[in-house]
Amino acid sequence: MFITYLIIGFTALVSLSAFNNPDIFHKGKHWPYAEARYGEYYRWLTSGFLHGDNMHLLFNMITLYFFGTAVEQWFGHLFPGVGSFLYLTFYLVSIVAASMATYYRYRNVQSFASIGASGAVSAVLFAAILLNPAINLFLMFIPIPIPGFIYGAFYLWYSSHAARRGGDGIDHVAHFYGAVFGFLFPLVLKPFLLVDFFAQMVSWFNSIRLF
């Protein structure tokens, strides 16, 4: 779990520093228009360590804490000796993958910019859903547990719908593609996980029939 704690600590340090230093914020934010014209592709990564305010930072880091530790343990279990490195690589590449999706959509829109670890956190969440599709998750303000695979389907639908609608200042494109990347990355390493994923779903449905 060391890598998850390291990511949380580093992200908090950078974000809190940027709160009091607009220059860090401006130079590090994901700004597709500037990236396309000036080659500032480093923003694809740096934006994942910046947040708009304390609540934005807190929400992402709490989510990462709960799901990142489980995913990190999985990497360590299946890849002894290199699990921590693979998990850190997974997280960093997730930031870049989510940013790339946004880049191709908004590279000609000068007014668009985004920040936050949400794309990578979505990737971690969906990796956790792949590993345990029956995990109980909760929608905001609804205290009823929802199986992870159902939550994930709703999450993807909502992110896609909200991305098309736009206008709320949230980078839903990054959320969507970060989630997709997080689901697919472990499958590239261990394809058998897809069989196990569906087996767990079938087991969940069978357990429902017993009641």
Image (cartoon, rainbow, N blue to C red):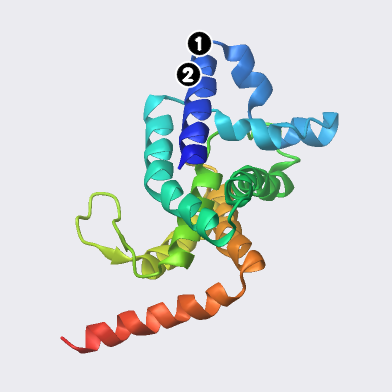
Q: Secondary structure at mark 2?
A: helix
Count residues near mark 2 (Cα–Cα under 10 Å), then give few for <14, some for 14-19, many for 20+: some
- Spot occupied by residue 146 in the image (x, y as percentages of width and height): 29, 65
The front one of 152 and 182 is 182
Q: Residue furthest left?
A: 211
- Spot occupied by residue 97 in the image (x, y as percentages of width and height): 67, 49
The front one of 195 and 73 is 73
The front one of 25 and 125 is 125
Question: Quarter of the image containing the N terminus?
Answer: top left
Q: Is residue 3 above or below residue 52?
A: below
Q: Secondary structure at mark 1?
A: loop
- Spot occupied by residue 211 in the image (x, y as percentages of width and height): 15, 86
Q: Is residue 196 above or below residue 75?
A: below
Residue that numbered label 1 is attached to: 20
Q: Residue furthest right?
A: 38
Which circle, 1 or 2, is nearer the viewer? 2
- Spot occupied by residue 101 in the image (x, y as percentages of width and height): 67, 50
| Residue type, mark 2 in image | Leu
Residue 142 located left or right of residue 53: left
Residue 183 located left or right of residue 129: right
Name the residue rendered at 48%, 66% in the picture. 130
Count residues near mark 1 (Cα–Cα under 10 Å), then give few for <14, some for 14-19, many for 20+: few
**Contact, mark 1 vs mark 2 (Cβ under 8 Å):** yes
Q: Is residue 58 above or below residue 132?
A: above
Q: Residue furthest top?
A: 20
Residue that numbered label 2 is attached to: 16
Can residue 169 be seen in the rendering of this structure? no
Q: CA distance from mark 1 to mark 2?
A: 7 Å
